[in-house]
Amino acid sequence: KLLEFKKGAAAPSGAGAGSGAGAGASADDPPPPRKRSRARRSNVFAQPVKLDMAWKPPVNPKTPAEKEIIREIMKKNMLFKALDGDTLEILIDVLEKKEFKDGDVIIKQGDTGDYYYVLQSGTCDIFKDGDLVLKVTFGMGFGELALMY
């Protein structure tokens, strides 16, 4: 059983060229300005999003125990741990239960992902380029990166 819901560092620049012996600079001279080692960043633009102010997120029923498990998992996740309590509760309420059978493919590498999954029971194998990279067990989540792209 899985619960699911739908839906980029620059290295520090090196030290500037110092004034070595024989360079004609005295110890009182300020160091030369650093050269920028990285290219200028380009701008990113997106279409404006029109929000329907009357929209309400769906609420899918869960037991208090299920909600607590999901809450603890999401608090440990890089993408969700900074959310305030109210926002986290909305996301928890939006999660819906899906059941998969042994051998079912939940998502295949290269497919567009639209869901974050939290494993409630059983196990799930994650493969990359045909190699097993992770065995997901109770309480683990996966698929959060798909929500970002």
Image (spheres, rainbow, N blue to C red):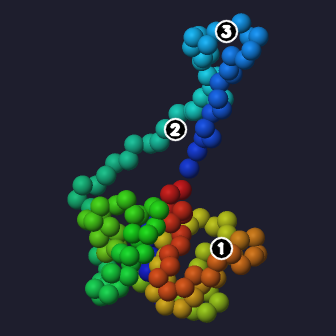
Mark 3 vs mark 2, foreground winner is 3
**Three-letter code, disc 2:** Val
**Three-letter code, disc 1:** Lys
* Disc number placed over residue 25 in the picture, else none: 3
Q: Is residue 13 above or below residue 107?
A: above
Q: Secondary structure at mark 3?
A: loop
Q: Position of residue 22 (x, y in %)?
A: 76, 10
Q: CA distance from mark 2 to mark 1?
A: 29 Å
**Three-letter code, disc 3:** Ala
Q: Is residue 107 visible?
A: yes
Q: CA distance from mark 3 to mark 2?
A: 43 Å
Quadrant of residue 26 in the image?
top right
Q: CA distance from mark 1 to mark 3?
A: 62 Å
Q: Is residue 48 above or below residue 124?
A: above
* Left-right relation of 129 to 101: right
Q: Is residue 31 above or below residue 149?
A: above
Q: Earlier in the sequence, mark 1 or mark 3?
A: 3
Q: Is residue 62 above or below residue 24?
A: below
Q: Secondary structure at mark 2?
A: loop
Identify the residue at image location x=64%, y=29%: 15
Identify the residue at image location x=34%, y=48%: 50
Q: Position of residue 70 (x, y in %)?
A: 38, 78
Q: Is residue 95 visible?
A: no
* Disc number placed over residue 44 in the picture, else none: 2
| Other-residue count near label 2 (Cα within 10 Å), few / some / many at <14 / 14–19 / ≥20 | few
Identify the residue at image location x=62%, y=86%: 104
Q: Position of residue 67 (x, y in %)?
A: 33, 81
Q: Residue furthest left?
A: 54
Tell me if label 2 and label 1 are in contact, CB under 8 Å.
Answer: no
| Other-residue count near label 1 (Cα within 10 Å), few / some / many at <14 / 14–19 / ≥20 | few
